Image: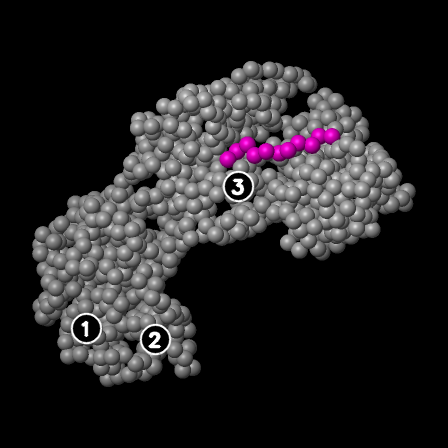
Amino acid sequence: MSPGLYVHVPFCRSKCPYCAFYSVPSAAPVPIWFEGIQKEVLLYKGRFDRFDSLYLGGGTPTFLDNRTLSGLVDHLFTHFDFAADTEFTIEANPCDLSGEKVRLLKDLGCNRINLGVQSFNEDTLSFLGRGHTGEEAREALTRLRSVGFDNVGVDLIYGLPGQALEEWLETLRCALSFQPEHISCYELTLEKGTAFGTLREKGNIRPMNEEDGRSCFLAASRLLRGAGYIHYEVSNYARTEAHCSRHNCKYWEHVPYLGLGPSAHSFDGKDRWWNVRSIRRYAGLLNTGLPPVEGRETLTEEQMRLESLALGFRTRQGVDLRFIAPDAQSMAALSRMEEAGLVNILDGRVIPTEEGFLVADQLPLYFS
Amino acid sequence: MDHIRNFSIIAHIDHGKSTLADRLIQATGLVEDRDFRDQILDTMDIERERGITIKSQAVTLPYVDKKGRSFELNLIDTPGHVDFSYEVSRALASCEGVLLLVDAAQGVEAQTVANAYAAMEHDLEIIPVINKIDLPSADIERVKEEIEIDLGLDSDQAILCSAKEGIGIEDVLEAIVKEIPPPSGATDGPLQALIFDAHYDPFRGTIVSCRLFAGTVRAGDRIRLMHNRAVYKVEEVGLFRLNREPKKDLSAGEVGYIISGIKTVSDVRIGDTITLDNDPAPVPLPGFKEVKPVVFASIYPVASDDYRSLADSLEKYKLNDAALVFQKDSSAALGLGFRCGFLGLLHLEIVQERLEREYDQSIIMTSPTVQYRFVLSNGEEVTVDNPVYYPDPTAIVKGMEPYIRASIMIPERYMGAVMDLCLERRGVNAQFNYPTPGRIEIRFDMPLADVIYDFYDSLKTVTQGYGSFDYELLDYRESDLVKLDILLNGERVDALSQIVFRESARPRALHACEKLKEEIPRHMFKIAVQGAIGGMVIARSTISPFRKDVTAKCYGGDITRKRKLLEKQKKGKKRMKMVGSVAIPQSAFVAVLKTDKDS
């Protein structure tokens, strides 16, 4: 399979309290970052096969000024080889999507927009520190459709402390009214290093309890599958096969990907490496002609196997049986999982069910 | 011999024994200040951490008194737990006097009394030392009164010190020289040396620690261990400084070591007498006792591939711990392992901890048990120290279990609580003594099985640490015994089976089910935990399955982290035992034995 290209755009209007991705709430370092990206592109020129997916993520790629954004896309297409049907995704924030910006994205050749809606409920949006309203999100979606974007993904968050199931379902129904091609439903994670993470350590905020989290997860799955969506990964739904995120699937199937920009991860089929998590150091290393790499690992066969388990149980593809040792203990665990309705075994693969997705972090342990 | 003093420091726990030893060692200049570290005599990590001494240690301190006379002060450190009371008695037998250390704020406590009595039994000179006088809460007058009343000692003699601040150390040293009598005994008579400890050195073999009561021993002598009549040739004798210091000879009154090609520590018996083969003493020194294991449990490697490595580790460990006995064992649930005998529950815990730490073994230890006897219908009497060999219940005519005589010393106010505890543990034949006003000694006959089941910890809890406890084995008595099995999802875990008194079976089973519920992590399926006698289930609990644990996001930057977590969990799983498809952590096997009081 063809590799994918990711570019990390580490800038945001403001930091959301739940987000652990590397980004800075300022446009000031954009020039030195852009200079860096241009150099990093040259470092990897010719080192990867023709890409068939391009993903601009962040941070907030749409936060970039129009000139930098066009310059970036231009530079990538000049120096890298892309397949004709490349899936070109840009992550977007509703408040950035002016009519002008939407047209620019279209002109740049972007054919998939992933919109950070998170919720249509005003209270939830303000708790999440989002700078937009539900109405603005709806407007952005309408605008995208009007310009002719026919592959739009919507990111949603559930599992806020005290959130009622009904409120979550309302957000989902509202999203469905736009018939997005892709919907991601993320349970709120109170990650270390984020504002919410700090609140959690102090005991001021608690994650949703297990049973409520289950209800939200299962209700979303029921609703979306009822509306015809495919639940193809723990947190991801697509309207048709073709609308599954081609780029993201590469992460889950050990297909090579190149990640450019601070904190981006890359994988070439054997080695994985990750860039420094600082724009200053990133630019500094590239200025001296060095790769801006923080760490690197060569995966052993066993490590590949463990990852295949960890990733496989999260997707509808499941895990190839060859990654599971045919010993008595594994086989007993497998049949218990089947009995418990967590997996189905089909054509030499272990496919998780909805219940299986819910415990996808546990399942690999039985075969590790 | 006039320049020798042999002494021990005895104290209630935390009254500052190790600190005082440290100061004495520093004051006599045995070790340079820059080489000094705290609790210098406690060489094992586990001793430092738990604040207990497991092995006796001896050190010879050079001391010049105020009048300019040179002395050799032999400090013999003693283990501080009832499991090792025999070792303590042999250490005390090697001394002429003790420093009885009392905390200036806490005053006389249970172990202070018990220790003082032990010293009196050995007819030792007792020097009371009031420690921690620098504490704001120190109440010296009250403590002096307690020393007078509770112990019947002359408190005017008591030395005031603060080991921590280095106050009064000189006075302590002077008192040792002045108050403790020098040893006596003829240096030219037949050799009589008391073995009070032995430890293993990988290069030299067994190093025997001994106190000479008569005669002289030097390199080249042929010595005889009087108990087992084994004869060895002496390679080296010497004194314990901080390291061993070879010497031409050791003679009556001295404390030192003998190296004589003894291969393992098990070849010597603590309390045995060493004499010369060609000029033997007519009788050994009094008080020798063969120490026998009273508590039994099996040890299994967590991963069955590690059996060989566990076997090697046990062999090596045994070199230094004669009290541990073991033989091969196997279990349906846990595979190949070893059945081991221990002096008591602390000894068991120490063995477990040292195997894990010093020998890097991942082990599972099964429920400790005592040695039961059963008379069968064919007239045969069998001894069972492993529940796996519990006889066919229909063939049992009667069961018998070992009883001990427990002796518990407490302040009066805890009498009710301690009586309740002892009766709950099937104590009978209560007797009471009143050694000093305000204190009671309670004696009870109790089944040993109920003592190893967490009795010592419970006693400490109900007496807030003021209860001291000692026991001796009495005899075997008839008892209604049953085998309690634990089943996980219907599968019997033989390593969790216990032989118990019938009336205790149900509470024990309930306790085990609850503990296992706490200790076994949730699985992807429901786990039924049951306690059963024969086919009858008498207790149950359920471990509910995992319902949701999946992380929301997993993209390029998350994969390495996720795998590393999995690798870590995989390592953790190596420390779990799979029984059927249930993973049982090691801790579960131990937790089943502990009561809630100490958790």
Q: Position of residue B296 (x, y in %)?
A: 50, 35
Q: Residue at x 70, y 26 (%)?
A: B117
Mark number displayed over residue A88 = 1
Question: Spatial distance from mark 3 to mark 1, Cα to Cα?
Answer: 69 Å
Q: Label 3 lies in what chain?
A: B
Q: Are marks 2 and 1 on the same chain?
A: yes
Residue B302, placed above or below residue B493 = below
Disc 1, SS:
strand
Q: Label 1 lies in what chain?
A: A
Q: Quadrant of residue B254?
A: top right
Disc 3, SS:
strand
Q: Position of residue A80 (x, y in %)?
A: 25, 81
Q: In the current view of this chain or complex, which residue is farthest to the front?
A: B378
Residue hosting label 2: A33
Q: Residue at x 64, y 54 (%)?
A: B202
Visible in this render: residue A321?
yes
Residue hosting label 3: B326
Task: Give the mark toward the camera: 2 or 1.
Answer: 1
Instruction: Classify mark 3: residues with Cα within 10 Å, few (<14), some (14-19) or many (20+).
Output: some
